């Protein structure tokens, strides 16, 4: 009985085993070939879409003339208002425009560095670089705009350096650069007319000079 049952079952088992093996190659080839083809097609499509999107972005930026891509700095104080506050005059007024002002807190101003600045013929004839001491002076003048404002208790008198600490020059500033200077009031002693400030100067978003400033107001 056992032998008979095994002989009877063996054909069904062989058929059940033979059917998958008979159709499995085509089944496997279909199941594998379709995802492979789809995956390749989707891969190529994703690349083509990415290329189109990148090209489209480039075309959009190229459609705008370069002279219209960059907005101008805002004007909070123009040169005439600056001259009303600071006592400096040519050739030592080194602030062209104030672009941000927070009374009693900080000021941000710009200095347009041009080849016509009077220090370039001597510093240096072969490689015009803005002197570091003049960068510090320009930053101090921005600090003076904060100090001499009535909102901070300033009297619009002269102000002087009382100390400079931790000054670092990171990169050279050359003709054609726009020096953006931020001066922040850290501490003010109204009784003695002494202010401590922190300053940073930037060109193209990169720090070119930084330091701590101690300044005093008075008549000398």
Image (spheres, helix red, strand yellow):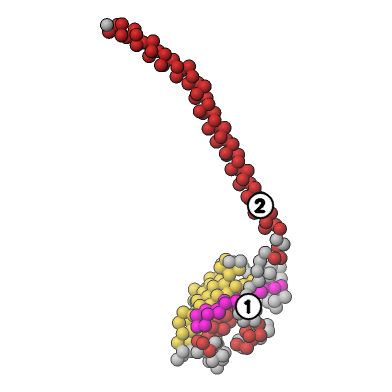
Question: Which residue is rendered at x = 70% and y = 61% of the image?
Answer: 64
Q: Position of residue 128 (x, y in %)?
A: 68, 70
- Name the spot of residue 14 as percent of width and height, x first: 40, 13
Identify the residue at the far bottom of this view. 219
Judging by the rendered image, the residue that carries numbered circle 1 is: 75
Is residue 46 positioned above or below 124 on the image? above
The verdict on residue 111 being magenta is: yes
Does 163 appear in magenta?
Answer: no
Q: Is residue 164 among what the camera can see?
A: no
Q: Which residue is mark 2?
A: 56
- Whether residue 195 sits left or right of residue 82 in the image: it is left
Q: Tag 2's secondary structure?
A: helix
The location of residue 26, given as percent across then percent down, is 52, 22
The nearer-to-camera label among 1 and 2 is 2
Q: Residues within 10 Å of mark 2 (few under 14, many from 20)?
A: few
Predominant SS along the magenta part: strand
Please give left or right for residue 26 compared with residue 3 in the image.
Answer: right
Q: Position of residue 74 (x, y in %)?
A: 62, 75
- Element carrying mark 1: loop
Asked whether the viewer can see residue 112, the reply is: yes
- Read off the magenta span: 98-115
Quarter of the figure with the C terminus? bottom right
> In the picture shown, does residue 6 fall above or below 210?
above
Task: Please name the residue shown 50% across and 21% down the image.
Answer: 25
Q: Quadrant of the N terminus?
A: top left
Q: Is residue 86 above or below residue 128?
A: below
């Amino acid at each position: 009985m056992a032998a008979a049952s095994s002989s009877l079952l063996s054909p069904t088992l062989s058929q059940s085993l033979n059917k998958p093996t008979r159709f499995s190659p085509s089944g496997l080839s279909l199941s594998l070939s379709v995802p492979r083809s789809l995956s390749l097609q989707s891969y190529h499509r994703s690349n083509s879409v990415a290329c189109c999107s990148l090209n489209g972005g480039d075309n959009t930026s190229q459609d705008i003339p370069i002279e219209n891509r960059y907005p101008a700095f805002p004007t909070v104080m123009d040169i005439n208002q600056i001259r009303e506050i600071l006592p400096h005059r040519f050739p030592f007024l080194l602030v062209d425009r104030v672009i941000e002002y927070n009374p009693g807190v900080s000021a941000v101003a710009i200095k347009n560095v041009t080849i016509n600045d009077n220090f370039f013929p001597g510093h240096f004839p072969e490689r015009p670089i803005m002197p570091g001491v003049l960068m510090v002076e320009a930053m101090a003048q921005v600090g003076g705009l904060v100090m001499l404002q009535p909102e901070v208790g300033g009297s619009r008198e002269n102000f002087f350096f009382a100390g400079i600490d931790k000054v670092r020059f990171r990169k050279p500033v050359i003709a054609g650069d726009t020096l953006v200077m931020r001066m922040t009031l850290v501490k003010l002693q109204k009784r003695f007319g002494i202010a401590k400030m922190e300053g940073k100067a930037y060109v193209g978003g990169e720090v070119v000079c930084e330091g701590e400033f101690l300044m005093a107001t008075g008549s000398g």
